[in-house]
Image: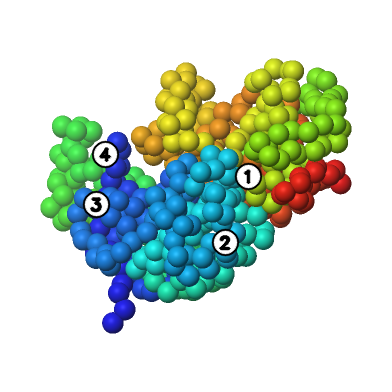
């Protein structure tokens, strides 16, 4: 019988937070790929850590097959077995390295490799180990189009229990047979690929919204009836009171006493008590339906046109890449309204070119919104610590942007280590407050969840400043840019402007 990964009534919370991340999770992961989706900071990476013995649950049990491998989002460190794999005589190691374009000198050149090359190395080593469980966090981050197809083909051949965290809809649809939607503190498994599971989730949410509307309507109707009966009960109570009757009017006092004895005036009070009970039940139902409400999303980038017509003006030249290659470029000019896409394969020098351009800027640093390709865990923690020290009003503005990008501000402020997606949202939130003249983003859709990518794309469509975007997400670039800077050759890279 094939091994399964089983979560049984699992609860978990991080030591640095007061809120529960997962509560009573019971899940079954059979062989094949399972997609794991949810907002940044919802616990996707934490679930992978639990599944691969990197974390232990607070309660409940996890039945884990014997061997596990984990590929994190970050690519700071080389895989421990990279050198062993690339020097092995194992034919399977050679085959995987060949399929993924891995070179023998990668272990000694790790710091010079692009993040896309590092990601391929990370996954290649994990596939070579052929574990019972393979957990991968955002495998197509940084990967160019050619390498992406090679990577997907390699993942399709894996026969064990695959856990895949990704914002790549095409990848999810090609690989997975079930999809786990994390809606902290719950997680709901739905059958099918991402598109099918997402449609089912949409139908469920539509049904919940319809039930919410029905409950609200019923609640308001009941509330009006409650107020009417309360007024009636107050009148009855007033009629039952002798205080307003003239003490010398014996006939009136007698009529009042006979009404009390008959109990007719107490009927409204009893109906009022019943109505209060029904209102309480209905309110509890409504609260249960709205406990997993979705937060309003969408941001506005408060950029402004630069006070100068030209932001960048560089003479033709060459930029050193790795000691043996140079990137040749023509005259580089960026005006205050240009919208530029920079494209090319992994390792061709795109990030190096960005650094070269940024170092040449001679205008106020705060007018540049820079989103680098990767932020180390140390820098991410430092940025979050600085944000916590902001004045209350400024902190509120930043956290409102975080919320409208689909993440929970309270969880972010509680965390000791923000996720890569959360720290990117934080840099965006901090940057747009400065009304930038130019926005430079290196792989901006990496690590972001799907709703956040849509929010960012919509915001950048209307911003009035210059854009310089590096991305392998062609749909994102086509929606936002009008000029293409292209590097087509890795060995002898030359920048062409189209």
Q: CA distance from mark 2 to mark 3?
A: 33 Å
Residue 443: mark in rendering: 1
| Label whose residue precedes the other's in the sequence (3 or 4) | 4
Mark 1 or mark 4: which is in front? 1
Residue 15: mark in rendering: 4
Residue 48 pos. (x, y %): 37, 55
Mark 4 or mark 2: which is in front? 2
Q: Residues within 10 Å of mark 2 (few under 14, many from 20)?
A: many
Q: Nearer the viewer, residue 387 or 225?
A: 387
Q: CA distance from mark 1 to mark 4?
A: 32 Å
Q: CA distance from mark 4 to mark 2?
A: 39 Å
SS of the residue under disc 1: loop
Residue at the image position 86 percent from the left and 36 percent from the top: 330
Mark 2, residue position: 100
Is any atom of residue 246 visible in this view? yes
Mark 3 or mark 4: which is in front? 3
Mark 3, residue position: 56
């Amino acid at each position: 019988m094939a091994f399964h990964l089983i979560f049984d009534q699992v609860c978990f919370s991080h030591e640095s937070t007061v809120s529960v991340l997962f509560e009573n999770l019971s899940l079954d992961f059979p062989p094949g790929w399972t997609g794991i989706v949810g907002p940044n900071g919802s616990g996707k990476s934490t679930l992978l850590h639990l599944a691969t013995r990197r974390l232990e649950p607070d309660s409940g049990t996890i039945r884990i097959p014997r061997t596990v491998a984990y590929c994190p989002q970050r690519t700071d460190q080389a895989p421990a077995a990279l050198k062993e794999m690339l020097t092995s005589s194992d034919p399977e190691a050679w085959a995987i390295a060949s399929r993924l374009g891995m070179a023998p000198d990668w272990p000694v050149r790790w710091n010079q490799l692009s993040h896309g090359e590092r990601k391929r190395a990370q996954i290649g080593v994990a596939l070579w180990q052929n574990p019972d469980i393979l957990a991968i966090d955002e495998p197509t981050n940084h990967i160019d189009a050619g390498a992406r197809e090679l990577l997907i083909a390699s993942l399709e051949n894996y026969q064990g229990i695959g856990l895949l965290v990704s914002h790549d809809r095409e990848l999810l649809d090609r690989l997975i047979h079930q999809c786990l939607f994390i809606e902290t503190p719950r997680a709901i498994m739905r059958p099918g690929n991402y598109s099918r599971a997402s449609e089912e989730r949409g139908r469920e949410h539509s049904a919940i919204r319809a039930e919410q509307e029905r409950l609200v309507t019923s609640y308001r109707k009941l509330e009006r009836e409650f107020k009417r009966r309360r007024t009636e009960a107050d009148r009855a109570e007033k009629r039952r009171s002798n205080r307003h009757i003239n003490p010398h009017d014996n006939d009136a006092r007698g009529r009042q006493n006979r009404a009390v004895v008959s109990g007719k005036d107490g009927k409204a009070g009893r109906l009022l008590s019943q109505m209060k009970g029904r209102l309480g039940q209905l309110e509890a139902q409504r609260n249960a339906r709205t406990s997993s409400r979705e937060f309003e999303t969408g941001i506005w980038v408060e950029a402004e046109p630069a006070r100068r017509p030209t932001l960048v003006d560089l003479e033709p030249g060459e930029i050193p890449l790795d000691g043996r290659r140079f990137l040749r470029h023509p005259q580089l000019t960026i005006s205050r309204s240009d919208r530029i896409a920079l494209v090319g394969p992994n390792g061709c020098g795109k990030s190096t070119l960005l650094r070269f351009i940024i170092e040449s800027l001679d205008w106020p640093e705060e007018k540049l919104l820079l989103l680098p390709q990767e932020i180390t865990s140390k820098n991410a923690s430092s940025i979050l610590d600085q944000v916590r020290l902001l004045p209350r009003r400024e902190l509120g503005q930043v956290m409102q942007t975080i919320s409208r990008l689909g993440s929970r501000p309270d969880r972010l402020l509680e965390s000791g280590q923000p996720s890569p997606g959360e720290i990117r949202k934080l840099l965006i939130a901090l940057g747009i407050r400065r009304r930038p003249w130019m926005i430079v983003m290196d792989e901006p859709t990496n690590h972001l969840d799907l709703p956040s990518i849509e929010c960012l794309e919509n915001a950048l469509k209307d911003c009035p400043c210059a854009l310089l975007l590096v991305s392998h997400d062609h749909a994102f670039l086509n929606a936002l840019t009008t000029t293409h800077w292209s590097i087509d050759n890795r060995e002898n890279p030359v920048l062409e402007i189209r």
